[in-house]
């Protein structure tokens, strides 16, 4: 008798859903993936492509993207041995989780947080120690500290500022978590450019268990090119990079990041615009009856409405695509949308004003 396919697969697959983006990835006003509303300008794209066509496309790139790593290390003012580049930060998450987890290992994940963390922990058959956020979506720092000790976790992963709650830990809180635990602490700083808090990066040589993750998909506006980085002290980096897929970053990604970092004022200008628009959006949202906005430390905002499914569909029919995050813990009837261009933000606000919300949110 032949065994069924299910018996042959990783048993963890039964607890994992296929990744989907509700509403798809196309819309007139696309605000559902926390991307930058600004594409790389044409003159810079042409410069990048001009370099790229001089490369040998028939030859593998370097085993690891050393050119990109050097460029980012120089940009940060740290040693290249502290930096690893990946094909999006998601790829780096796979690498670091593979390096740190396995059956019998315990990982602390604040709940709610970026969904890939849980998926990877489940795939690697590790035990998830979940620490709920507070009802206002803030991190429960005391509970994180206490649970890390009580449960002797091996690995802690924190997205700060956090997706999807849009809240941050302070610099001192992150330091305290990493200092008071002997677990490896991965701090995902995907949205750090939009934060009021300082990056924890300066402590990588002081804290031997600290790894910082950065993506180039948000503030740096390169989601389509797929670039992420991990930063840690060289000793830890040499270990956590061992499971990395060789040749995962293309020559195009290395050239692109080098050129974009050399023109970083494009990023700082975009970030200033986004922060300004975020404040405008927050103020406008506060004035809409039936909408409860949460103050954000990222390039996106969370609102609570009386019926998120209805509002999601109604916005979708009006050509506006947001993310329905209602299924996440503590985020019942919440929607998430990133800051867009001025017109896009206005259109969103106008549409929300026209919704027929009941007088109060239950
Ligand atoms: C907290 C966080 N980490 C990592 C990522 C992955 O980014 P990428 O793979 O595009 O670098 C995202 C994307 O939304 C995110 O929100």
Image (cartoon, helix red, strand yellow):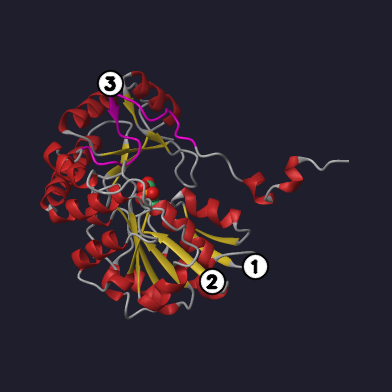
Can you say whether 4 is above or below 200 in the image? above
Task: State which quarter of the image contains the N terminus.
Answer: top right
Residue 33 within the segment the image draws in magenta: yes
| Ligand 1 is within 8 Å of the C-beta of the residue at disc 2 | no
Which residue is more in the foreground, 310 or 39? 39
Marks 1, 3: nearer the viewer = 1
Residue under the image location 22 percent in, 35 percent down: 340
User: Which picture quadrant has residue 224?
Assistant: top left
State the extent of the magenta-drawn residues as a range.
Answer: 20-37
| Ligand 1 is within 8 Å of the C-beta of the residue at disc 1 | no
Q: In terms of secondary structure, where does tag 1 sit?
A: loop
Please state if 81 lies on the left or on the right of 127 as rendered.
left
Please state if 291 lies on the left or on the right of 277 as rendered.
right
Question: What is the spatial separation of the Cα atoms under label 2 and label 1, in whole angstroms?
Answer: 10 Å
User: Which picture quadrant has residue 23?
Assistant: top left
| Residue 165 visible within the image | no
The residue beneath circle 1 is 104
Q: Earlier in the sequence, mark 1 or mark 3?
A: 1
Q: Earlier in the sequence, mark 2 or mark 1?
A: 1
Residue 78 within the segment the image draws in magenta: no
Task: State which quarter of the image contains the C terminus.
Answer: top left
The residue beneath circle 2 is 154
Question: What is the spatial separation of the Cα atoms under label 2 and label 3, in whole angstroms?
Answer: 49 Å
| Residue 96 visible within the image | yes
Query: Residue 208: image x %, image y %?
Result: 39, 79
The residue beneath circle 3 is 354
Q: Earlier in the sequence, mark 2 or mark 3?
A: 2
């Amino acid at each position: 008798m032949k065994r069924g396919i299910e018996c042959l697969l990783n048993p963890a697959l039964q607890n994992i859903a296929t990744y989907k983006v509700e509403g798809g990835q196309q819309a007139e006003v696309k605000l559902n993936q926390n991307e930058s509303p600004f594409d790389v300008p044409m003159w810079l794209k042409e410069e990048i492509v001009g370099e790229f066509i001089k490369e040998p496309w028939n030859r593998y790139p370097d085993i690891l993207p050393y050119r990109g790593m050097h460029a980012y290390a120089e940009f940060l003012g740290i040693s290249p041995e502290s930096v690893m580049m990946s094909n999006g930060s998601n790829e780096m998450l796979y690498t670091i989780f593979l390096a740190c987890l396995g059956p019998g290992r315990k990982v602390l994940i604040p709940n709610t947080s970026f969904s890939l963390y849980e998926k990877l922990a489940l795939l690697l058959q590790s035990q998830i120690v979940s620490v709920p956020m507070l009802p206002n979506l803030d991190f429960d720092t005391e509970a994180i500290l206490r649970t890390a000790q009580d449960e002797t976790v091996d690995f802690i992963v924190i997205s700060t500022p956090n997706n999807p709650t849009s809240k941050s830990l302070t610099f001192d809180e992150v330091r305290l978590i990493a200092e008071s635990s002997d677990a490896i602490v991965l701090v995902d700083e995907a949205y750090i450019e939009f934060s009021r808090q300082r990056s924890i990066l300066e402590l990588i040589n002081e804290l031997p268990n600290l790894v910082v993750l950065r993506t180039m998909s948000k503030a740096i506006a390169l989601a389509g090119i797929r670039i992420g980085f991990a930063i840690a002290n060289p000793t830890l980096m040499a270990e956590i990079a061992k499971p990395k897929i060789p040749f995962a970053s293309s020559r195009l990604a290395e050239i692109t990041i080098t050129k974009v970092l050399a023109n970083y004022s494009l990023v700082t200008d975009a970030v200033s615009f986004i922060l300004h628009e975020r404040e405008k959006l927050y103020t406008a949202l506060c004035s809409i009856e039936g909408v409860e906005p949460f103050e954000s430390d990222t390039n996106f905002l969370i609102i609570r409405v009386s019926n998120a499914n209805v509002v999601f569909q109604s916005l979708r029919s009006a050509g506006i695509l947001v993310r329905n995050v209602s299924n996440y813990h503590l985020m019942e009837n919440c929607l998430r949308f990133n800051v867009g261009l001025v017109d896009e933000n206005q259109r969103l606000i106008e549409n929300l004003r026209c919704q027929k919300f009941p007088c109060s949110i239950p």
